[in-house]
Amino acid sequence: MLPHVLVLGGTTEARELAAALAGRPGTRVTTSLAGRVRRPGEVAGDLRVGGFGGAEGLAAWLRERRVDAVADATHPFAETITANAARAAAATGVPLVVLRRPGWRPGPGDRWHPVPSLAAAADLLPRLGRRVFLTTGRLGLAAFAHLTEPHFVIRSVEPPEPPLPAHTHILLARGPFTVADETALLRDHRIDVLVTKDSGGAATSAKLTAARDLALPVVVVQRPPLPAGVTPATDVPSALHALDALTRP
């Protein structure tokens, strides 16, 4: 058994992983959240909220709390904490398991436009439509603030802060969403282009199906690369298996 596992959380998979580990006798689990969402939901085991102070601060925390393994189950776009986790694990010798849900893949009928960044998405938008459903989250909206012509419908779990585009309608909602709901939203707001990050998972994938059914273009912001040498587990059972392997002689 692993006496103490730190789960870097903020995703459904992180909650599921913490619950599975906490159910094992003799295993202590601490989930760490960045604190960007006011009501993150309950997690099994201990909970800490806030940053560590970079890779050095995380390394110090691992030593002080005698952490035996780190499971990075953060959002696929949380590249800073993932990089810090890799550096801290290397500095302390604490094993690291990275859990990343698979990204989405286009299918027949999809009109996807992959881009490397939010800035690239903003550059492409004027050529695709004037009524935009923006579902990239409340962080990074400044990349679209200079666009004065399009009308944006922005969906976010928490209220976004300025700067925002000039013509903006805010929808506060948390998934999962159904295809019927997403189709109705796209029609009601007369959306002609969707912008999303390649977050993966089923909770927010219905919008992609709705966009396909309505033949709408979709701008997909691609994921940042993982640190060199990191091969992720793609689901909770795989992450548990990787953690179990750390205890084998």
Image: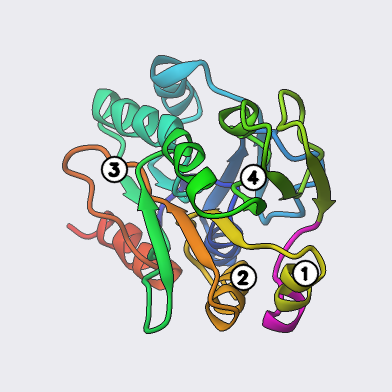
Mark 4 or mark 1, which is nearer the start of the sequence?
A: 4
Q: In this view, does 149 lie to the left or right of 103?
A: right
Figure colour scheme:
rainbow
Q: How crowded is mark 1: few (under 14 residues within 10 Å), some or many (20 or more)?
A: some
User: Residue placed at 47% from the left, 63% from the top?
Assistant: 200
3 or 4: mark nearer the eye: 4
Closer-to-camera residue (63/135):
135
Q: Is residue 147 magenta?
A: no
1 or 4: mark nearer the eye: 1
2 or 1: mark nearer the eye: 1
What's the distance in space between the residues labelled 1 and 3, CA to CA? 32 Å
Please give the residue where the numbered disc 3 appears in the rendered image: 225
* Type of amino acid at the residue the image marks with label 1: Leu
Please give the residue where the numbered disc 4 appears in the rendered image: 137
Q: Residues within 10 Å of mark 3 (few under 14, many from 20)?
A: few
Please give the residue where the numbered disc 1 appears in the rendered image: 185
* Type of amino acid at the residue the image marks with label 2: Lys
User: Which SS does the magenta portion mostly show?
Assistant: loop
Query: Residue 228, image x and y in percent?
Result: 18, 38
Q: In this view, does 149 lie to the left or right of 75?
A: right
